[in-house]
Image (cartoon, rainbow, N blue to C red):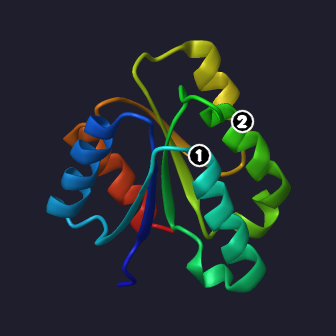
Amino acid sequence: MKEKKIFIIDDDEISIFLLKELLLTQSIGDNVFTFLFAEKALEEIRIALDTDPAQLPDIIFLDLSMPQMSGWNFLDSLRFYEDRMKGKCVVYIMTSAIDISEYKRSSEYKLVGGYFNKPIEMDALDIIRKDIYSR
């Protein structure tokens, strides 16, 4: 089974630490990259698309509320690449508070595979695991 490359994009270092540890202990992925700023992750994605699409992340965990570039702005920036990334990358939105309007809005993005409350718990991780290994 191919090792999953994972991006965690969140401005909260504690959330990043907890999710990364959970992913590693549950053997979801050993190749985990963390970003405090969405712009840096977007830059890495653009480089991969331009040079070697095999280097795209398989999974992106994305916080919506971040300074500078929000999760929504990040998703809007990815729209240009959605067709090239579809089937290669899935985005899971992480949020501190479930908002029905945000949940509905997230379904407008082709790459979004799920919307979860932070911190990600085991039941959500089981759903994610089944989803990513069925792709």
Task: Verify CB contact (< 8 Å) between mark 1 and mark 2.
Answer: yes
Does 105 sit above or below residue 17? Answer: above
Asked whether, in this view, residue 29 is left or right of residue 49, the answer is left
Q: Position of residue 17 (x, y in %)?
A: 25, 46
In which quadrant will I find the N terminus? Answer: bottom left
Residue 105 circle label:
none
Compare residues 37 and 109 and report the one nearer the observer.
37
Which disc number belongs to residue 73?
Answer: 2
* Image quadrant in which you'd find residue 104: top right
In percent of width and height, residue 133 lies at 40, 68
Residue at disc 1, secondary structure: helix
Q: Is residue 51 above or below residue 15?
A: below
Q: x, y (%) of residue 20?
A: 27, 53
Q: How many marks?
A: 2
Q: Is residue 7 left or right of residue 48?
A: left
Residue lying farthest to the right in this orientation: 80
Q: Is residue 120 visible?
A: no
Q: Label 2: how many residues lie within 10 Å, few (<14), some (14-19) or many (20+)?
A: some
Q: Amino acid type of disc 1? A: Ala
What residue do we see at 28% from left, 32% from top? 119
Name the residue at the left extreme. 25
Residue underneath mark 1? 38
Inter-mark Cα distance, 1 to 2: 9 Å
At x 20% / y 42%, what residue is drawn?
Answer: 122
Say whether residue 17 is left or right of residue 134.
left
Q: Amino acid at mark 2?
A: Asn
Crowding near the residue tagged with mark 1, few <14, some 14–19, many ≥20 C-alpha atoms within 10 Å:
many
The quarter of the picture where residue 131 lies is: bottom left
On screen, residue 76 versus residue 16, left or right, reads right
